[in-house]
């Protein structure tokens, strides 16, 4: 009798477990990843997706279990060892060398050399060919540290493609990308698959997963819930599998402030590098969304407001008090809290504890009020951490041990603790799972309800529209349109972002 033996899967995991201290990050995970497919991993923050990716790519050794690559047992000792077997990874937290150029970063450790030194011309030729192939355009000679997050992320993708990897693990590759850039990424992933490459895709964007993936594995609390064909899943079946419950409605209901609500943040004719003549106000109880494409000047504007970027004209006032000589520190004292876009570079001290990180920006104000007593601080911190549901709820653990989404929640906890007048959130739900995303939305709405003014920057148009009472669209450094958040459509926002012209 003849039997057709199917080819061995590209990756087969059998009973993989991994524990960090008391946390069981992976519990006897078994799964098969077919060659030449896009295989998605989904699950809540902390479900074990990144840990699984790290085991496959040799960053972490599992405590137990077995892994086979195309039918052969392997035990990677390091990412380099994995790379020798054609396994590359794009980490969730980017690993760019800021003082090297874009091209140097991409070919780091694999530069075309002749007689020991790097041939610059070869390098930039290869770089351009690669960019063209993948459909990205990042200037070759720009220092990587000067690039925005989205472009740094592209370098990581280029780097893996340049290594000719047969299996690429992408941990939330589109988290920092705009819609347009995401489409490029999707094309790149499809072309990788068409060339026979296997892609393991970790993403919180379920629509993206459903669109791109051939197979989907759902993880919950470190264990596999199921692996199925993408065609057999929908957003709601995935959410239910991830959370163990269904979610009703993505956004909380909106309640705009009354007409007599006082202005909390007033920005007038503010100009700074990348920003021109920004004028707007945020009232108590109001959520104002700042939309626009990457590079439109949204981050530049909020940086100018808090003084992280020097403004050369215009004014900012908090509760009617004009804030001159602004710096993030001073603005914090004035009651302006900012949740930064990049938690790694601007937000957290990863080796310090969760509690310390939460209290970081408030210590000064607490002590000014004479409130810093260890017990009191601990109680307040614990309360606020519980409120944002940081998991695991261990205030003494280092912040670096939290999963990406939980680090983001930590930043929110810190902001809450400050009891600010104005909250500026720059991409607050980047890398946050659907359940936690909803709790962050609830928090934003609750804060506004308490009388804060909220300025929300997000590349996710649906998110801006779902939360904001008013939407300001930026383009080319200027606010080019103001839309009523209660009635505006996605189409209107995008149209303004792409085509509306400012005064220029
Ligand atoms: N280096 C570490 N030390 C201690 N605990 C860790 C470490 N890395 C991960 N963990 C824990 O292991 C669990 C799984 O984390 P992991 O990063 O794999 O989650 P994830 O699914 O990628 O989440 P996210 O969607 O937030 O990125 C979490 O509880 C996390 O806190
Ligand atoms: Mg992760």
Image: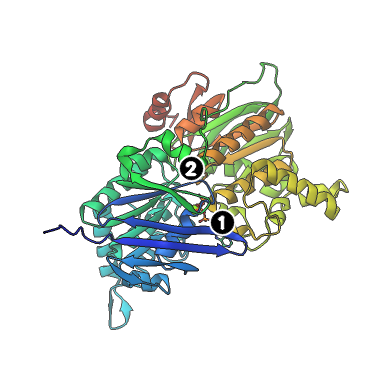
Q: From the viewer's perspective, tell me whether residue 427 is left or right of residue 413.
A: left
Mark 1 vs mark 2: in front = 2
Vertical order, 73 against 342 (above or below): below
- For mark 1, give the secondary structure: helix
User: Split into 4 quadrants, where in the image is the C terminus?
Assistant: top left
User: For the residue carrying disc 2, how many other residues have a C-alpha within 10 Å: few (<14), some (14-19), or many (20+)?
Assistant: many
Vertical order, 308 against 336 (above or below): below
Vertical order, 261 against 219 (above or below): above
User: Split into 4 quadrants, where in the image is the N terminus?
Assistant: bottom left
- Any part of residue 188 in sight: yes
Residue 341 picture location, percent across and down: 54, 47
Q: From the viewer's perspective, tell me whether residue 331 is left or right of residue 148.
A: right
- For mark 2, give the secondary structure: helix
Residue 232 picture location, percent across and down: 32, 38
Residue 489 picture location, percent across and down: 43, 23
At a point 41% along the width and 41% down the height, the residue shown is: 178
Snapshot quadrant of residue 452: top right
Q: Which residue was labeled with disc 2? A: 242
The tag earlier along the polypeptide, 1 or 2, is: 2
At a point 56% along the width and 59% down the height, the residue shown is: 24
Vertical order, 394 against 59 (above or below): above
User: For the residue carrying disc 1, how many other residues have a C-alpha within 10 Å: few (<14), some (14-19), or many (20+)?
Assistant: few
Marking on residue 345:
1
Q: CA distance from mark 1 to mark 2?
A: 30 Å
Whether label 1 touches label 2, CB < 8 Å:
no
At a point 40% along the width and 52% down the height, the residue shown is: 151
Snapshot quadrant of residue 147: bottom left
Q: Residue furthest front?
A: 1
């Amino acid at each position: 009798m003849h039997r057709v033996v199917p080819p061995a899967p590209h990756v087969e995991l059998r009973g993989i477990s991994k524990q960090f201290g008391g946390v069981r990050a992976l519990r006897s995970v078994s799964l098969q990843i077919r060659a030449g497919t896009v295989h998605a991993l989904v699950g809540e923050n902390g479900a074990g997706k990144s840990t699984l990716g790290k085991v496959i790519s040799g960053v972490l050794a599992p405590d137990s279990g077995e892994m086979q690559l195309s039918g052969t047992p392997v035990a990677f000792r390091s990412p380099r060892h994995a790379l020798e077997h054609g396994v590359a990874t794009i980490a969730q937290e980017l690993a760019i060398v800021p003082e090297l150029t874009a091209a140097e970063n991409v070919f780091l450790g694999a530069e075309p050399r002749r007689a020991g030194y790097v041939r610059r011309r070869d390098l930039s030729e290869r770089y351009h060919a690669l960019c063209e192939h993948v459909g990205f355009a990042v200037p070759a000679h720009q220092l990587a540290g000067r690039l925005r997050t989205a472009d740094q992320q592209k370098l990581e993708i280029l780097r893996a493609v340049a290594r000719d990897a047969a299996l690429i693990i992408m941990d939330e590759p589109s988290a920092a990308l705009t819609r347009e850039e995401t489409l490029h990424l999707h094309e790149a992933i499809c072309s990788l698959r068409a060339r026979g490459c296997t892609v393991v895709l970790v993403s919180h964007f379920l629509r993206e997963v459903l669109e791109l993936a051939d197979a989907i594995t759902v993880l919950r609390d470190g264990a596999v819930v199921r692996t199925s064909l993408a065609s057999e899943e929908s957003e709601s079946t995935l959410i239910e599998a991830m959370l163990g419950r269904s979610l009703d409605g993505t956004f909380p209901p909106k309640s705009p402030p009354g007409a007599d609500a006082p202005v909390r943040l007033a920005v007038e004719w503010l100009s700074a590098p990348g920003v021109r003549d920004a004028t707007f106000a945020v009232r108590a109880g109001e959520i104002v969304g700042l939309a626009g494409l990457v590079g439109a000047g949204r981050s530049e504007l909020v940086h100018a407001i808090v003084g992280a970027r020097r403004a050369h004209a215009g004014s900012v006032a908090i509760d009617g008090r004009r804030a001159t000589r602004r710096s993030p520190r001073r603005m914090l004292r004035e009651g302006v809290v900012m949740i930064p876009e990049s938690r790694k570079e601007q937000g957290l001290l990863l080796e310090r504890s969760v509690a310390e990180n939460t209290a970081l920006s408030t210590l000064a104000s607490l002590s000014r009020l004479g409130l810093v007593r260890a017990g009191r601080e601990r109680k307040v911190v614990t309360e606020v951490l519980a409120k944002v549901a940081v998991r695991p709820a261990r205030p003494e653990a280092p912040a670096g041990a939290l999963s990406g989404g939980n680090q983001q929640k930590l930043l929110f906890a810190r902001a809450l603790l400050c009891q600010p007048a104005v909250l500026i959130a720059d991409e607050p739900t980047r890398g946050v799972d659907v359940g936690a995303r909803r709790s962050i939305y609830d928090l934003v709405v609750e804060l506004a309800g308490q009388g804060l003014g909220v300025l929300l920057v997000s590349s996710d148009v649906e998110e801006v529209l779902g939360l904001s009472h008013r939407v300001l669209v930026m383009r080319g450094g200027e606010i080019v349109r103001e839309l009523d958040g209660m009635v505006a459509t996605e189409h209107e926002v995008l149209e303004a972002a792409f085509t509306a012209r400012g005064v220029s």
